[in-house]
């Protein structure tokens, strides 16, 4: 397992927090040394919840290795580009 | 100016994003070398927006120095304690 392969990335969407917590815990149980949790816009707060719940309740030996924020440009429905904040949280054993 | 004194901290609440952007920019214009942006719960995404807008549009020479996440316990309305994620973003010149 060499770390941040695509399958070690969890994209946080509109499902409940525990769906993503389970996805992250499963990655660690399958031997991943690190998992990257990604989210955009209002879902960023949910990504932080996921990282905190994994760390405090399910996989106590992981730590937050890196947190990265950036701005992405995405096409909106009317075809113009709009800017949205994005975050990546890397947690590792 | 010695860095992260309390007056260099901006707490992100329910006002519009630009209120907090203005508060951060004002700190830098007053000579602060670093500003800490703090938020809890769903307001975490707004804190990221504030940091990104300051950095990309208003104070291009600042960088994200540190991002820290934690879980806080707060008393809820019925008197019990509930857990909430919190974030601190330090941006500095």
Image (cartoon, coloured by chain):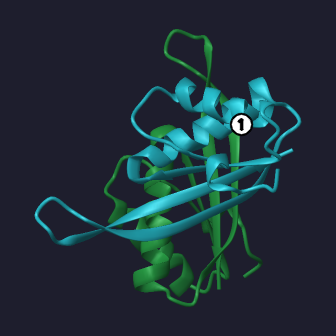
Chain colours: A cyan, B green
Q: Position of residue A59 (x, y in %)?
A: 81, 30
Nearer-the-camera pick, A83 or B76: A83
Q: Position of residue A73 (x, y in %)?
A: 34, 71
Q: Note whether residue A38 is visible.
A: yes
Q: Secondary structure at mark 1?
A: helix
Q: Is residue B77 above or below residue A37?
A: above
Q: Position of residue A51 (x, y in %)?
A: 66, 40
Q: Position of residue A5 (x, y in %)?
A: 68, 56
Q: Chain of mark 1?
A: A
Which image quadrant for residue A69? Answer: bottom right
Q: Is residue A67 left or right of residue B56?
A: right
Q: Residue at x 77, y 29 (%)?
A: A56
| Residue that label 1 marks | A27
Q: Is residue A30 above or below residue A81?
A: above
| Rendered-image quadrant of the N terminus of chain B | bottom right
Q: Residue at x 62, y 43 (%)?
A: B86
Q: Residue furthest front?
A: A1
């Amino acid at each position: 397992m060499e770390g941040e392969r695509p399958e070690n990335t969890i994209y946080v969407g509109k499902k409940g927090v525990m769906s993503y917590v389970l996805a992250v815990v499963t990655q660690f149980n399958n031997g991943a040394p690190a998992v990257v949790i990604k989210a955009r816009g209002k879902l960023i707060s949910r990504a932080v919840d996921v990282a905190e719940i994994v760390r405090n309740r399910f996989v106590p030996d992981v730590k937050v290795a890196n947190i990265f924020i950036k701005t992405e440009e995405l096409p909106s429905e009317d075809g113009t580009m709009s800017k949205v904040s994005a975050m990546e949280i890397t947690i590792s054993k």
